[in-house]
Amino acid sequence: MTLSPHGIDNVAQAQAAWPERRAICRALLGAAVVATSPFVQAQRMYSGTLLSLPQMMDPIVAGRPLREGGVLIDIPVLVDNGFLVPARVVVDSPMTEQDHVTHLYLLSQRNPVTQMALFHMGPWSGRAEIGTRLRLAGSQKVVALARRSDGSFVWQQTDVIVTESACVDGT
Amino acid sequence: MSQARMQLPSRVQTGELVKARLLVAHPMETGYLQDLNGRTIARNVIRELTCDYGGRQVFRVEPSSGISGNPFFEFFFRAEQTGELLVRWVDDQGQQGQLRQTLQVQPPASRPAR
C-alpha cells in the first residue's frame, strides 16, 4: 500500500489492513502445520512415549511377587535395523514339574504395542530358552518377564540402541 | 509353496533335548505402515502359533506387531519317540497355515550288559 497525500483516510485504511494481514499470516501458518502433520505424526510414532517399568509390567504382574534377575537377555547392544533384532532369552529354571516357567513375556518400552510376544512353556520344554527376532521402534529398554509355576515373576531388562527405527513411515 | 521351514537335529536319542528352529513366511503387517498411495495397510500378524508333538503342545507363542516379518522362533523340547511335529498358526485375517515334519528319535545307545 502506497502512502498518498490524501490525508487521514489513507492512514486509517493502512491501519485497518493490518488485522487482515495477521489473519492471512495465521492462516498460512495453520496450513503449514496441517501440511506437515503426517511428518509430525511419524515423528511422534518414532519417539513414542517411553513407558516406565511399572507401566510395562504391572498389567501382567498384577501385584504378585516380582523379583529382578534370573533372566538372561541376549540382544546386540547396537542394532542397525529395528525391523529385525535377533533376541534370545534364557530363564534360570530347572524346568521340573515342581519348578518351571509357564509364561515368558517380551515387553518393549517404546513400541505402540508393548507386549511383543508371549511364549508358553512347561516342564516338557526341558530348558527355558527362546530365540526370536523382534521389531523395535527406536532405542529403548527391552524387558523379559517370566512367570514361574509358583505364580511369582522374575524379570530382567536390557538397553538397546536402534539406529534405524522400525517406524520410519512418512519421514 | 511351503510357507514355513523347520530345522531339527538329524540324530536324536530318547530323552534328549531338541532345539527346533522355525521360520514362517508371513508379512506380519503392523497396521502402522502405509502403502505407496498413502493408505494405511491393515494389521495382519500371526495371532497364535503352536507346535504339537507326541500328543502334547510343546510350544505356543502369541506374537504381536513387535515380532519381525517372516518370524523366526527357536524353542526346546524333550524327545520321546519318533513322531510328527505339527506346527499350526492363524493370523488376523483368519488365514491358517501348517507344517508337518517328522522327528526321528533313536533309542538311547545301550551299553553292552556284561
Image (cartoon, coloured by chain):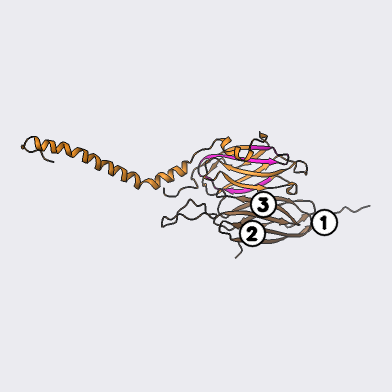
Image depth: mark 3 or mark 2 in front = 3
Chain A shade? orange
Chain B shade? brown
Q: Residue at x 73, y 39 (%)?
A: A150
Image depth: mark 1 or mark 3 in front = 3
Q: What span is colored magenta in the figure?
A: A129-155
User: Do we see residue B103 in this rendering?
Assistant: no
Q: Is residue A124 above or below residue B25?
A: above
- Give the secondary structure at mark 1: loop
Q: Which residue is mark 1?
A: B107
Q: Please state which of residues B111 and A88 is positioned toward the viewer in this rendering.
A: A88
Q: Amino acid at mark 2?
A: Arg
Q: For residue A109, what is the image quadrant?
A: top right
Mark 2 falls within which chain?
A: B
Position of the N terminus of chain B, as image quadrant, is bottom right
Q: Inspect the magenta stretch and tell me whether residue B72 lies in it.
A: no
Same chain for marks 1 and 3? Answer: yes
Q: Amino acid at mark 3?
A: Arg
Same chain for marks 1 and 2? Answer: yes
Q: Which mark is residue B5?
A: 2
Q: Which residue is mark 3?
A: B60
Residue A69 position within the rendered picture, expressed as x and y whole percent measured from the top left: 66, 35
Q: Please state which of residues A95 and A120 is positioned toward the viewer in this rendering.
A: A120
Distance from label 1 to label 3 (Cα)?
Answer: 27 Å
Mark 1 falls within which chain?
A: B
Instruction: Name the residue at the left extreme.
Output: A5
Residue A86 position within the rendered picture, expressed as x and y whole percent measured from the top left: 59, 47
